[in-house]
Amino acid sequence: MGEIAKIRHLTDIRPIDYHSVNELFTCRSAAHGDAVLKRCNTSDAEFAAELNTLREYGGRRFCRVLEYDSDNKIMLLERVTPGTRLKAEPSLERRLDAFASLFQGLHIEPKNAAPYPSCADRICRAADFLLNRSDCRGLHGYAYALRAKELCLSLSERYPKKVLLHGDLHFDNILKNSAGGYTIIDPHGVIGDPIFDVPRYILNEFWDYRGTFPAVIGGLSRRLNISEDVLRQGFFIEAVLSTSWDIEDGNFKNTDDIAFAASLLEG
Ligand SMILES: Nc1ncnc2c1ncn2[C@@H]1O[C@H](COP(=O)(O)OP(=O)(O)O)[C@@H](O)[C@H]1O
Ligand SMILES: [Mg+2]
C-alpha cells in the first residue's frame, strides 16, 4: 500500500468484493469524502485510456476522477452511492430504459484521440488473433473471425462517426447514484461510432438473463431506433471480441457464444 500514500489522506480502506484483475477499495478521503480507490493491473496504455476517458467526460454521466497517480496506475474516484449495479435491477424494461437514457446523447468527440485505440482496430486485432490460432479453426473460429472483420468493416462504413466510446458499457459498469439515476464507471476508451457501445450491453444481458434475450434486442431496437439486424451484427462482433480476449487471457472455454450469435445472423 506504500504507493497509495501519494493519493492524499485516505482512511477506512476496505476491499470491494468483485472478481477483477484490478484492485478496488472503498475509502474515505480527507479532501473529497467517500471515494473508491482503483489500482489497475492493466497495461500503461489501457490505464491511460481509462483515465483520459473519465477526465474527458468530466463527470457528465460518468463518475469523476478526484486524484490519480499514473506512475502507479491508481485512481481515486468519486464513490457512486448506493452504487447498486444495473444488473441487480430485476425488471428488464427498467434496465433497458436506464441503458437507453444513459446512451442517448452520451458521446463526445475526444479533445485528443491519441490515447485511444480505434474500435475497428480492436475488433480486427481480436479477429486476427483467432485467425492465427490453429485450435480455433476446428470450432469454425476461422470463419467466425473472417465474418467479424467483414461485419465490422461494413458497420464502420455505415456508421462512420469517430467519438469517444466507453468500450465496455455493460450493466456492472452502470451504478445507481444518489439522485436515483445511474452513473457510468470503468471505461476502456476507444474511438468509433456510438453504435459500437451497444453490443457489450447486449452480451452481458445474454450471459446473465438468457431467457429474455429476444426482448433485449427488440427493446433496444425500439428505444435506440437501431435496426434489430444491426444489433445482431454488433452482438456477433462482440461475442468474437470477448471470446478472443478470453483465449488471450488463458480462459478459453468454447465458441458457443459466437455460434449462438452467428445463428441469429441468418434469422
Ligand atoms: N466509483 C465507484 N463508486 C462505487 N462503486 C464502484 C466505483 N468504481 C467501482 N465500483 C465497484 O467496483 C466494481 C468493479 O469496478 P470496475 O471499475 O468496474 O472494475 P473492473 O475494471 O475490474 O471491471 C463495480 O462493479 C462497483 O461495484
Ligand atoms: Mg468493470
Image (cartoon, helix red, strand yellow):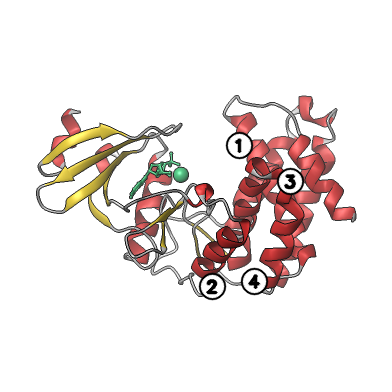
Q: Give the CA distance from mark 2 to mark 1.
A: 28 Å
Whether tag 2 and tag 1 are in contact, CB under 8 A, the answer is no
Name which of mark 2 and mark 3 comes first in the sequence. Answer: 2
- Asked if ligand 2 lies within 8 A of label 4, the reply is no
At 49% from the left edge and 52% from the top edge, which residue is drawn? Answer: 86
Report whether 83 appears left or right of 189. left
Q: What residue type is labelled 3?
A: Gly
At 49% from the left edge and 66% from the top edge, which residue is drawn? Answer: 102
Which one is in front, 213 or 66? Answer: 213
The secondary element bearing badge 1 is classed as helix
Q: Which tag is nearer the camera, tag 1 or tag 4?
A: 4
- Reading the image, the residue beneath label 4 is 223
At 51% from the left edge and 47% from the top edge, which residue is drawn? Answer: 88
- Asked if ligand 1 lies within 8 A of label 1, the reply is no
- Reading the image, the residue beneath label 1 is 245
Q: Which amino acid does label 1 sit on?
A: Trp
Q: Residues within 10 Å of mark 1 (few under 14, many from 20)?
A: some
Residue 159 seen by the camera: no
What x and y, as percent, mark residue 94? 56, 61
- Reading the image, the residue beneath label 2 is 104
At 74% from the left edge and 64% from the top edge, which residue is drawn? Answer: 218
Q: Which tag is nearer the camera, tag 4 or tag 3?
A: 3
Q: Give the CA distance from mark 4 to mark 3.
A: 20 Å
The secondary element bearing badge 2 is classed as loop
Name which of mark 4 and mark 3 comes first in the sequence. Answer: 3
Q: How crowded is mark 2: few (under 14 residues within 10 Å), some or many (20 or more)?
A: few
- Reading the image, the residue beneath label 3 is 211
Whether tag 4 and tag 3 are in contact, CB under 8 A, the answer is no
